Each structure stands twice: as C-alpha cells, then as structure tokens.
Amino acid sequence: MFTGIISAIGEIASLEPRGGDVRLTINTGNLALGDVHLGDSIACNGACLTAVQLTGHGFVADVSVETLSLTTVGNWKTGSRINLEKAMQASDRFGGHIVSGHVDGIGEVVSLHEDARSWRFRIRAPRGLAKYIAHKGSITVDGTSLTINKVGGAEFELNIVPHTMTHTVMSDYRVGTKVNLEVDLVARYLERLLLGDKAADSLN
C-alpha cells in the first residue's frame, strides 16, 4: 500500500529482455534504501514492483507481460525518469490517499499551460475509467496523489503547484505523454459492493 506522495525521482539504468518479459535495473537517486529488503514493494510511476535484488545505487525488478501491456513500463528506456515511493509503514503519515500500486489504465496528456506559478494539465483517461473520476476527487497519475479540479467526459484537469513539478516527473510531461492512472480505491470497491448478490452471477 502507498500514499501517492513521491519520495524521489529514479532513473532506468538498464532493461534486459528475459523470455518475453523484462528485468529492470533502477537507480533510485536519493531514495533511502536502508530499510528495504528483498521482496519489498516499490511504486515506480505508480506501478508496484518487487525488489528482487539490491544494488549499490538502487534495485532490480522483474516486470511481467501483464504489467508491460497495461502500464507505461513498456515505453520506458534507459535514462527514463520515474517517480518512486516505498510501501508505507503503519507509523507513516498518510499525506495523500489510499494507493494500491495497481495501474487501472493509461492516460494521455492533451494540454498543459502555466497558470501563475502553477501549471494546468488536462489528461484524457480511457473511457472505462471516466465513471470513477469525480470533481475534487483523488486520482493517482504516475504514482502521484492529485486532486481533480475539473471533469469533462473522460478528460480531467489538474492544478500542479511548483513543489510537485520539482519533486516529480511532471516537469517532463508534454502533449502526448502517456501516464499511468490509478483511480480512487474506494470508488472501485463501492462499484462492486453496489452489485449486491449480482456480483456472484458471473466473472466481472
């Protein structure tokens, strides 16, 4: 479990194809790894990856075909910058919202412009996610917990303050940039709960 508060910006050091999937080596920059052990989870642009090896500068993770097909990981290259967050501990501050690290879909930046010292971003989500996106609700974009300022169809707007621009990869975004999206966990469970007994009728 994560909170969507980015701890550091990492960089892809290498990508090694392995039998159809990929092994990543990630340099974690100033992310403290003293309390990270093999098997621990680290959110990488919002995708929960398992550390299978620790290096002097970061960690190694295996990425399945499923993750490659459903997230932006398949577009990463050596040198790509990514947001990093270690799994939260029970004693941590809950600064963002409940984030599972399970990407729901890939969005696309459709516009961006400066607004005083902040930036305004408009992102288009897959149509199937539109029902989970609410005005002033929470959404995770590349692992960052953000508040939705405006909604129009499957598109939503974000107001990004200078601190977030500096401490996440959002400063790298351009029109056309693909981003990992995770909708509010509560909304997903609420939808399932509202099915009632019908939830057991078929595979949903």
Image (cartoon, rainbow, N blue to C red):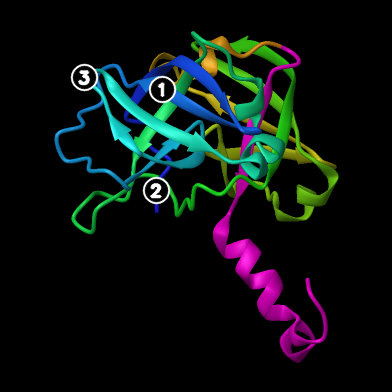
Callout 3 environment at 10 Å: few (<14), some (14 to 19), or many (20+)? few
Query: What is the distance, in whole Å, between disc 1 and disc 2 at their CAs?
Result: 21 Å
Q: Position of residue 102 (x, y in %)?
A: 56, 49
- Is 179 covered by the magenta stretch? yes
The residue carrying mark 3 is 56
Residue type (three-letter) at the residue carrying disc 1: Thr
Q: Which residues are magenta?
A: 175-204
When the figure is inspected, residue 202 is found, relative to residue 161, above or below; the finding is below
Quadrant of the frame with the C terminus = bottom right
- Residue drawn at 44 percent across, 51 percent down: 97
Q: Secondary structure at mark 3?
A: loop
Residue 66's disc number = none
- Camera-side residue of 102 and 14: 14
Residue type (three-letter) at the residue carrying disc 2: Phe
The residue carrying mark 1 is 25
The residue carrying mark 2 is 2
When the figure is inspected, residue 170 is found, relative to residue 184, above or below; the finding is above
Callout 1 environment at 10 Å: few (<14), some (14 to 19), or many (20+)? many
Between discs 1 and 2, the one toward the N terminus: 2
Q: Quadrant of residue 36?
A: top left
- Residue drawn at 52 percent across, 10 percent down: 78
Quadrant of the frame with the N terminus = bottom left
Say whether residue 151 is left or right of residue 119: right
Query: What is the distance, in whole Å, between disc 3 and disc 2 at their CAs?
Result: 24 Å
